[in-house]
Amino acid sequence: MNADFSRVLSLLRQEKGISQRKAAAALGISQALLSHYENGIREPGLAFVAKACDYYHVSADYLLGRSLSRDGAMIEAEDLADASEGKEDLKGSVMAKLQKKLIVNTASVLFDLLGRTNNKDAVAHAGAYLSGAMYQLFRLLYRTAGGNEGYFSTGNTSFNMDVVSADMTLERVRFAKALEEYRGEYPPVDAQSLAEEYAGLSQSMAQVFHDTDERVRKLEE
């Protein structure tokens, strides 16, 4: 098994809102054994995997972390909703809409450039780094709004100790390493080339860079 199995198994039980004791009874094992499965201490047999899939109404691929779709279908990029297409009306203030456009547009340019290099490692590490930032912001919002943090498999103690930031730092290092080891050709990334090729998006990117530089400059004073 892999680490995804224990994480998903624990998350499914928490989503169902039941205790380990109740889930273990339904699955025909002891609470201690279920705890070992959920914490990755022991690996279950195929019979347990099949029973857990039936109990939580998910596919084995989802339970094993091989698919993000609960029915086991492999999610393709074309199947995902794309907020950058502007089809969704973002609720809230003008500031919220502005920040969404700045971040989404900048991310679009970043991943378009990375995609053109076909540097899969760099793409994966960039995605992991940015995912960590979104995870932290959502979790803090979730916590403040009174949501049950059992939705997340990382414990409160670890989250409060900033382990997600540590993971982000590692992903940034891996991203830099993937760029350094890449032997292909990069697309032009100077200001003029970006402005010409990403007209309309480059303005958002420039604003993001400016705002960040301004915040950093104040720290340096």
Image: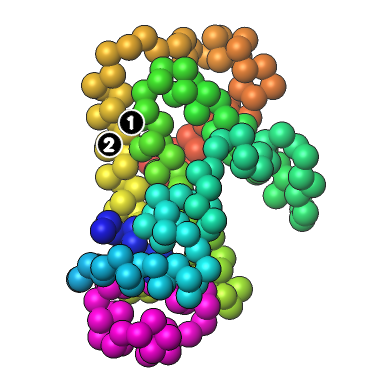
Disc nearest the viewer among 1 and 2: 1
Up the image or down, 148 lies above or below 114; here it is below
Q: Position of residue 211 (x, y in %)?
A: 55, 37
Residue sitting at 56 percent across and 9 percent down? 192
Relative height, residue 64 to residue 127 (above, below) = below
At label 2, which amino acid type do we have? Arg
Residue 206 percent coordinates (x, y):
58, 26
The N terminus: image quadrant? bottom left
Nearer the observer, 55 or 130: 55
Q: From the image, tell me which residue sits under label 1.
A: 121
Q: Is residue 151 left or right of residue 179?
A: right
Task: Provide the secondary structure element on which disc 2 rests.
Answer: helix
Provide the residue designation for mark 2.
Answer: 174
Q: Which residues are magenta?
A: 10-39
Alpha-carbon span between mark 1 and mark 2:
8 Å
Q: Looking at the magenta stretch, what is its main secondary structure?
A: helix
- Does 33 lie within the magenta span? yes
Relative to 10, 71 lies left or right:
right
Task: Name the mark on residue 181.
Answer: none
Where residue 33 sits: x, y (%)? 25, 81
Using the image as rendered, state which of residue 182 and residue 194 is in the foreground.
Answer: 182
The quarter of the picture where residue 98 lies is top right
Mark 1–mark 2 CB contact (< 8 Å): yes
User: Residue most toward the left?
Assistant: 41
Q: Amino acid at mark 1?
A: Asp
Q: On the image, which quarter does residue 30 sit in?
A: bottom left
Residue drawn at the location 45% of the way across and 11% of the way down: 187
